[in-house]
Image (cartoon, grey):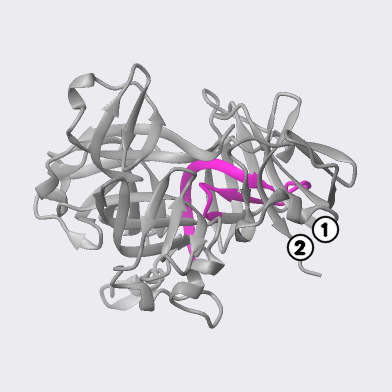
Amino acid sequence: MKKITLATLIGLVLTGCGGGGGDDSAAPQPPVETKPQLVMGTIDRIDPVNNEITVNGMPYQVNDVEYANKPLADGIALLQPQMMVELTALTKSNVTVSIEPTMVGIISDITANTFVVNGVTLDYKLDPELAGEWVMVSSLPVVTELGLGYKVLSVIKIEKDDFGNRYELEGRLTNLNEEDQTFKIGASTLVNFSKAANLDEIECDDDRQGIQCLTNADKQWVEVSGEMQGGIFMADEVEIDSDDAEGQEVEIEGIITDINSDKTKFTLNARNQFSINNQTKIEYNDQYVDKSMLAIGSFIEVEALNGVAQEIELDSDDSNVSGFREFEKKGILENITATSFTVNGFKIDIDSQIIIDNNEKLVDLDGFRVEVEGVIIGTRYVAREIEREDD
């Protein structure tokens, strides 16, 4: 993963140590134990005595700990199990741990099975006494009946001073309004980026930069930091998360949020893109299986090199965390009613969650060629986003 405002991660460099004289220099040397350059996952275990954490089942000795690109003086003492972290590692004894929460903020409401942080309602049972407290939420993107939502992994009470008194929110960017300098994260939280100090520094994969990158990033995963004011997230920094696996060996756990029809490419956690080839090994319940087992909602751990999955392990206890699947249809939109329309004769339902690109009305698209993305709920195909296709 790359945050486009940041420099690319340093490549793996291994240097040999000089030996003694004579024939010893040619003698076989024990291999240097290395691990993937980039590891993303949740903390399974913390061993403060040995300054060690376990992520994705593998132990790592911690060199330093940072949050928001700044070192944390208390280091490993601030880490807790189930925190989402990103590790950059050259060897198992030299690891930088970056804390990567989905949200940081104040819990504004708690019900029997939900809570609200930064304007986002999350399905997760919490102790009511946490209302009004600062928390760090780690989650993974998951397809829900309302579109791309969150599977909460942990909610950890924090001292805000330890993490710079900053609100943070990640999610899919939608409804960009360049004139008002706003967009939404998901379907709920309105973000105002008019005071984002780094806006001009954002760079795209092409020649565009600044606000044009946000236009290019619509429907992509973004991260904002700033402050909640009157229900609006006032961002002082905006970052775009996208895949940067080229030239790297990575190990990432997460949820498949998109996969093509022949299952040769998939997106993990709404931002990390990988391809599958004939050499990719897929394991489930200690047995190798074919790629037909992979689906949107599958919880997996993937090891990849240069963006190509080398090994994929399906979680045997929670192999699919979503009861929903996404769909995509292209064609002529017709037969509009209050509850549905058709694309090339295929019926698609609509509800209050539908988003139409460029703020067009559904009736304006009658007879035009469109691209529809949505979610399958039972036997119903429900539209979530509609975009007019260019001629």
At 44% across and 43% down in the image, what residue appears? 188
N-terminal-most mark, 2 or 1:
1
How far apart are the alpha carbons under marks 2 and 1?
Answer: 8 Å
Q: Is mark 2 on a helix, strand or loop?
A: loop
Three-letter residue code for mark 1: Phe
Circle 1 packing at 10 Å, graded few (<14), some (14-19), many (20+), is some
Residue 17 quadrant:
bottom left
In the image, residue 233 lies at what x, y percent?
A: 31, 52
At 41% across and 74% down in the image, what residue appears? 202
Left or right of residue 348: residue 197:
left
Q: Nearer the viewer, residue 123 or 76?
A: 123
At 45% across and 76% down in the image, what residue appears? 203
| Residue identifier under label 2 | 389
Write down the region rendered in magenta: 248-272
Closer to viewer: mark 2 or mark 1 = 1
Q: Quadrant of the C terminus?
A: bottom right
> Is the Cβ of the residue at disc 2 closer than 8 Å to that at disc 1?
yes
Is 250 a magenta residue? Answer: yes
Q: Of helix, strand and loop, which mostly describes the magenta segment? A: strand
Three-letter residue code for mark 2: Glu
Left or right of residue 294: residue 37:
left
Task: Name the outermost residue toward the top.
Answer: 112
